Each structure stands twice: as C-alpha cells, then as structure tokens.
Amino acid sequence: MTTAQLVHQIKTKKSFLCIGLDVDLTKIPTHLLASEDPIFEFNKAIIDATHDLAVAYKPNTAFYEAYGLKGWQSLQKTINYLNDNFPEIFTIADAKRGDIGNTSSMYAKAFFEDLKFDSITVAPYMGKDSVEPFLAFENKHTILLALTSNEGAFDFQTLTVGEEPLYKKVLHTSQTWDNASNLMYVVGATKAEYLAEIRKIVPNNFFLVPGVGAQGGSLQEVCQFGMNHQIGLLINSSRAIIYAATGIDFTQKAREEAQKMQQEMETILRTNFS
Amino acid sequence: MTTAQLVHQIKTKKSFLCIGLDVDLTKIPTHLLASEDPIFEFNKAIIDATHDLAVAYKPNTAFYEAYGLKGWQSLQKTINYLNDNFPEIFTIADAKRGDIGNTSSMYAKAFFEDLKFDSITVAPYMGKDSVEPFLAFENKHTILLALTSNEGAFDFQTLTVGEEPLYKKVLHTSQTWDNASNLMYVVGATKAEYLAEIRKIVPNNFFLVPGVGAQGGSLQEVCQFGMNHQIGLLINSSRAIIYAATGIDFTQKAREEAQKMQQEMETILRTNFS
C-alpha cells in the first residue's frame, strides 16, 4: 500500500485508529474457546465489528508465537482474512525484528512476501544493514522503533549520544538510509511532550503511536504535537478495545470503544484538516 | 540447562562450537528438496554428523519464518529432535526479540516453554522491562545483543553515551537487572580487539560469538581476549560448516569443517585449562 492510499483511507473513514490484535486466550470470551481456532475467530469478530472505524490492524507476533504452530496458523488466517476482505486496511506485523543483512532479508520475505503485511516494526540496535533489507521493498513500510512507550525506554533510548538523545540519533541516521521514505517510526504516546521535537526531525514520516488509553497517553496531546500535513499518525489501541468486554456482547463493546476513539479523531481532523 | 552443565559439556567434548542452523532452501543439497520437509532433513543430517563436535545449535528464526507455517513446523521438529536425542546440547533460538513487558513474556513462553529452547537472543533497545521477563525463567539463558558482528554495529552501538560506548552501557546496565546471572551476551568476533574490555565489565557471563570464519573473525584472538575462568565462550559458525559442500557428501564435509574448529578449540583448551 502506498502512503497516499493510507492517507486517502484516513480521510474517508475520518479515523487514524489502529487496532492491536494481541490475543491472549486467557482474556477472550470463554464461549470462543470451543471453536477450532479461537484466536482467529476472536480476530475475525473484532475486525468485522470495527473495520469501518479503523484504518489499520496490528497483530503483535509474540501473542501468536506463544501458541506455537497453531498460533502461527491463526496469524496467517488473520492476515489473509484482512487482505481478502478489506484490502484498503493497512496491516502491521508488530514483530520488532532486526538482524544482519542476509537474515533481515529473510524476515522481510517472511512478512512482506509470505504473509503479505503492508508493514513491519523493526528494532534499530543493529544499524543500517539490519534495516535496509526491509526498506528495499516497494510500497511496504518499515516502522522503526524510535521512542517506545515503556519505562525501559529511559534505559538507553533517552541517553545522550554526542549532542542529542539516542532516539533522535536513530531518527537522524535512519533518514540517510536507502529508501528512507519507506520509514515510519514508533513513538510512544506516554511521551507526548517529546513529539514536537521528533516531528521537527522527521516532518514527512508517519508515526505509529502506542500507549494511548491503557498506558495513559492522551490522544489530544499526541495530535497537537505529532500531526503533520498529511496527518502522519496511526494511533494504536489494543486492550482498551479488544478486551472492552468478555461476554457474548464483546464485539458490540469493542465497537463502542473504537467508535469513541474514531469520533474523537473525527473532531480533531475537522478542526485541523477542513 | 544450567551454566555448570554447559561448562561440563564443553570440557567433555573439548569444544565450545555452536553450529548455526540457518537453512536456505536455495543452498542445501538439491537431492533433499524432494523430501517432505527438506529443512528438517537437512538439519537432522547436519546434527547427526556433528553432534559430538558441537556443544550448541542455533537456528535463526528468520530462516524458518521465511517459509511460513511449514518453516515454523521445521523449527519445531528441529528443536524436538535435539531435545529428544541430544539432551546435553545447549539450544539457542536466535530470534533477537524484545518488546514491552507483557509482550516479552509471551515471547519467553513461546521459546522457553512451547519450543523448549535453553536460550534466546534478545535486543536491548527497549530496556529493562523488555528483557527481565526472559530473565525470570530458571535455568534458561537470555543472550543480549551487546556488540554485533555487522557493519551496522557502528551506527549506534559504538557511539559514546556519557563516558562509554553504548554497548558498554548495555553491559553495565543489564548487570543491574533482576536475575542478571541468566544473561549471556552476543559479541561479534569481527571486533576481537574490543573483547578484553568487554570481559572486564562482565567477567562471569558467557559470550555467544558470531563472525568467526565467513565474516572474517579469528578464533585465536577471540579466545585470547574473551575467555574467562569457565571458558565463557560459544563460537558460532553457520555457513562455513553447513554449506561446506552441496553434494551427497555434504554431511561428511560439514563434519570435516566442524572437526577443524573443534581441534583448534581442543588445542586452545589444553593450553589454557590443563
């Protein structure tokens, strides 16, 4: 998917909501556990109930790998379901991969060619040759960890290297890599005050923003400091939407939560892009 | 597996060789491609031919994920084959994972409980709460990326933060985390001159050392600067061993390459630990 197609979808749906499909079998409605593939059935129900309110879905691979072969199968069925039925949806493999060059190429092949995701999250620690194999894919997007939403972000990401914190160095350096226009960045909502400065360094790239809701970040603040001329934000919510309820009405509750966020986003878009 | 068991195995086999099972279907002997699971058949043949010369095997997950469900199945069969037939072997999931706390817990569950690996490689960028969920597993080992063997290591890992390079900061900081005794570190052989200083910071932990052979690092130098009182090194070789030949004699050639390394290691051990 091109960035232009993503922006078009955002304007059409009046939403820049990404729903995280982090499926934990101990948290989903118990009536689903009897089905052959409870993870996929849960995802399908959530997607069916929310696809007009969200522009992106983001399965985190950890939650699938934890269930072994069956989990990997559920991931494959989920991405196939999205691609077959909702080709306008932007899909994100939240995999946080990264390895030496020829190995990163295998990961890129796995997620872009085999599973056909539009994008993947990638860790920056191993540098240029660990990320460029992902960037080489046309109309695929590499979402580089910059400043994450967790407490551990302060262990290394915010330390000063030379004259700037490491996460800014990651932003600056990555912009010099081949096909840098295929980069997006993970920037945690829990650190909204950093967003204005980050936006100055990378004015044109999209940010994937976790941490609104369950982790305490404010949507208003994120938009105030992080938006750019083409919106440039995908706000992720996982638990607050997919586990809004655990009874047979879980899809309705999930939809209500997604709708609340979409409506807040619509108001913000109307104020800034009309 | 405990560290003591690993050290015992090293002394018994007179080897600290780790063989990387990075299986690329375009590189394996063509006569295997007709079998139902060529990746597993290749691994089984390599393991059968080398298990008395190596103390560890390290499948890199990228090479399995690239083949989708079938690849994940081959990975599962490979680790099961190792655990069932060679329980003394130390197994490493070269996965370079790392995510926020509850998500890292899912990865730990995937690799330690479901697949039953002894260890996993983990990326440090997201800090303490992304690594501690792995460290919480008793007798399992978390192999943290410190200084990797690729060119991109110079993009961020060697930059100065405060008074030391980032990779040293990663070493120092990680030693303060809960269950730090379960840590090992990835230190590339291509940077052998750094090893003496790294060893000073973490005198007791094992290093997993890639980059000897195909990537140009010297075994003698790595041992000179990196060994500790309990050897403390696992030297990985992937391509130089598993792709030593591509004919029907590939297992014999792989064994010959593994034996060359084992003999060099035996000489080094005799000089230093007798």
Image (cartoon, coloured by chain):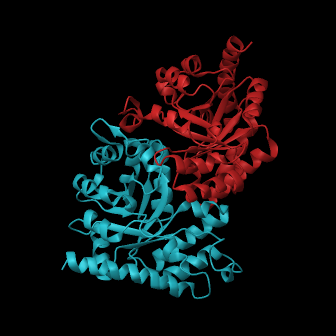
Chain colours: A red, B cyan
Q: In the rendered view, does B53 fall on the left or right side of B96?
A: left
Residue nearer the viewer, B35 or B239:
B239
Q: In the rendered view, does B121 fall on the left or right side of B25?
A: left
Q: In the rendered view, does A168 fall on the left or right side of B226?
A: right
Residue B48 drawn at (x, y percent)? 50, 84
For the N terminus of chain A, give its image quadrant: top right
For the C terminus of chain A, give its image quadrant: top right
**Would you say residue B157 is visible in this rendering?**
yes
**Would you say residue A34 is visible in this rendering?**
no
Residue A34 drawn at (x, y percent)? 67, 54
**Image point 48% across, 27% down: which residue?**
A190
Residue B222 drawn at (x, y percent)? 32, 65
The quadrant where residue B92 appears: bottom left
B112 relative to B8, above or below: above
Circle count: 0
The quadrant where residue B75 appears: bottom right
**Image point 23% across, 65% down: which residue?**
B228
B78 relative to A41, above or below: below
Residue nearer the viewer, A90 or A140:
A140
Residue nearer the viewer, A259 or B142:
B142
A196 relative to B222, above or below: above
Q: In the rendered view, does B33 fall on the left or right side of B209?
A: right
Residue A50 drawn at (x, y percent)? 72, 33
**Image point 59% across, 20% down: which residue?**
A223
